[in-house]
């Protein structure tokens, strides 16, 4: 992947509210970390813990926070912005358009589109796709290869769906969603009843509905509701390998990180962050603004704006205190053992 960006184009992309310090007049041909960058590369300081690397970086252009106090070297330029990480994202978004151009509108000859489906004339349907009866594909949708869109499913405008994704029957995908490789929207919810010693399947006849600007990561599964709707709110971002159970409701602008599992019928509010490998039991209510730390196990409902962690999850201050005390247990047991021996020897001496 090659590209070349002159300074004026970089400034145009990241916005006019940028302060320039130093001198570099060439073009940027690469993006690299502070420690690995070379001449011709652009780098950035997104995490303060790496600020000491700035003065040693060989990058030609560095995106830095406005309060950075260092000075550029010869033939080096500092671009100071409010949010270096987001400024880099804007640049990468522009590069992505060139490196991964949108395919032309139209239906690939190897794709199968049911005669009753409605595919907008600005949509792009890739090789070996399947579009079922009464399905609707909106304007400027991009379907890569080997995608299955089920009966009466709907895909909103400008949504991008990557290879091997399944959108099951009757599910609805909002506008500007990004469904990454291998995710499944509308798999059966996990429901069984024990009847006369045998597990009987409970049919799952609901659907999944995602709001606008939702991202779903690779190999993530979102189960259809037993009845009604599994809901993913506007702007929510779901990482790879996440399991969302049937009838779950996730609010707006939430973040679910890798290997999170949410059991059925749990309600998650707006702006919730669930860190990696956390598990949430079913039929709970998670309030707005809650933060659930990594590898936590949530078995009770959580009030709004709390930060919780541990197994079972509880207030992070309590969890951190417990972890601190756990580290002292070996020494504590040694002290008790010594006390027991001292008491026992004293008792024997007295008797």
Image: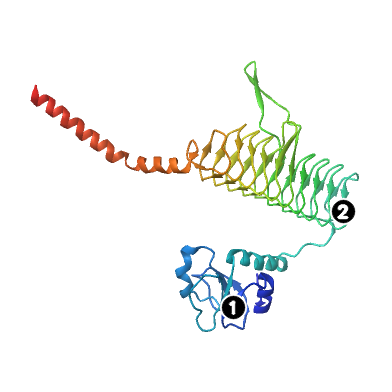
State which quarter of the image contains the N terminus.
Answer: bottom right
Mark 1 or mark 2, whichever is nearer to me: 1
Compared to residue 338, the image places residue 129 above or below, namely below
* Residue at disc 1, secondary structure: strand
Q: Residue at x 50, y 81 (%)?
A: 73
Front position in the image: 71 or 40: 71
Q: Residues within 10 Å of mark 1 (few under 14, many from 20)?
A: some
> In the image, is residue 266 above or below residue 61?
above
Q: Position of residue 143 (x, y in %)?
A: 77, 54
User: As rendered, which of 96 and 292 lies closer to the eye?
Assistant: 292
The Cα atoms of the two marked residues, 1 and 2, are separated by 45 Å
Residue at 44 percent across and 43 percent down: it is 317
Q: How is the image coloured?
A: rainbow
Give me the residue at 81% from left, 45% from top.
154
Residue furthest to the top in view is 196
* Residue, disc 1: 20
Under tag 2, what secondary structure? loop
Which quadrant does the C terminus fall into? top left
Pinpoint residue 313: horizontal percent, then vertical percent. Answer: 50, 38
Label located before the other in sequence (1 or 2)? 1
Residue 23 appears left or right of 335: right
Rendered image quadrant of residue 286: top right
Reading the image, the residue beneath label 2 is 120
User: Alpha-carbon neighbours of circle 2 within 10 Å: few (<14), some, or many (≥20)?
Assistant: some
């Amino acid at each position: 992947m090659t590209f070349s960006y002159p300074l004026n184009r970089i400034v145009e992309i990241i916005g006019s509210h940028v302060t320039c310090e130093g001198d570099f007049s060439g073009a940027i041909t690469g993006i690299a970390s502070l420690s690995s960058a070379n001449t011709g590369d652009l780098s950035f300081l997104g995490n303060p813990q790496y600020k000491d690397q700035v003065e040693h970086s060989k990058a030609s252009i560095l995106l830095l926070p406005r309060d950075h106090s260092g000075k550029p070297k010869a033939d080096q330029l500092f671009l100071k912005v409010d949010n270096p990480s987001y400024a880099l994202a804007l640049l990468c978004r522009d590069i992505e358009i060139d490196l991964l151009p949108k395919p032309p509108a139209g239906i690939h000859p190897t794709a199968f589109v049911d005669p009753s489906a409605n595919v907008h004339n600005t949509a792009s349907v890739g090789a070996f796709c399947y579009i079922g009866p009464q399905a609707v594909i909106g304007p400027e949708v991009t379907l890569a290869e080997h995608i299955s869109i089920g009966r009466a499913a709907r895909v909103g405008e400008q949504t991008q769906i990557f290879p091997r994704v399944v959108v099951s029957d009757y599910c609805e995908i909002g506008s500007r969603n990004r469904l990454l490789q291998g995710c499944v929207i509308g798999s059966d919810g996990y429901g069984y009843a024990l009847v006369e010693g045998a597990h009987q399947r409970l049919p799952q006849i609901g659907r999944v509905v995602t709001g606008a600007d939702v991202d779903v990561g690779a190999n993530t599964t979102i189960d259809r509701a037993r009845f009604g709707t599994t809901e993913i709110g506007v702007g929510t971002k779901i990482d790879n390998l996440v399991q969302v159970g049937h009838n779950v409701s996730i609010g707006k602008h939430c973040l679910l990180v890798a290997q999170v599992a949410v059991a059925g019928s749990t309600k998650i509010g707006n702006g919730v962050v669930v860190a990696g490998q956390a598990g949430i039991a079913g039929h709970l209510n998670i309030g707005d603004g809650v933060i659930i730390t990594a590898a936590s196990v949530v078995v009770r409902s959580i009030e709004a704006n709390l930060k919780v962690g541990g197994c079972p999850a509880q207030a992070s201050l309590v969890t951190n205190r417990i972890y601190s005390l756990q580290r002292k247990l070996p020494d504590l047991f040694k002290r008790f053992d010594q006390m027991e021996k001292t008491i026992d020897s004293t008792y024997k001496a007295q008797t």
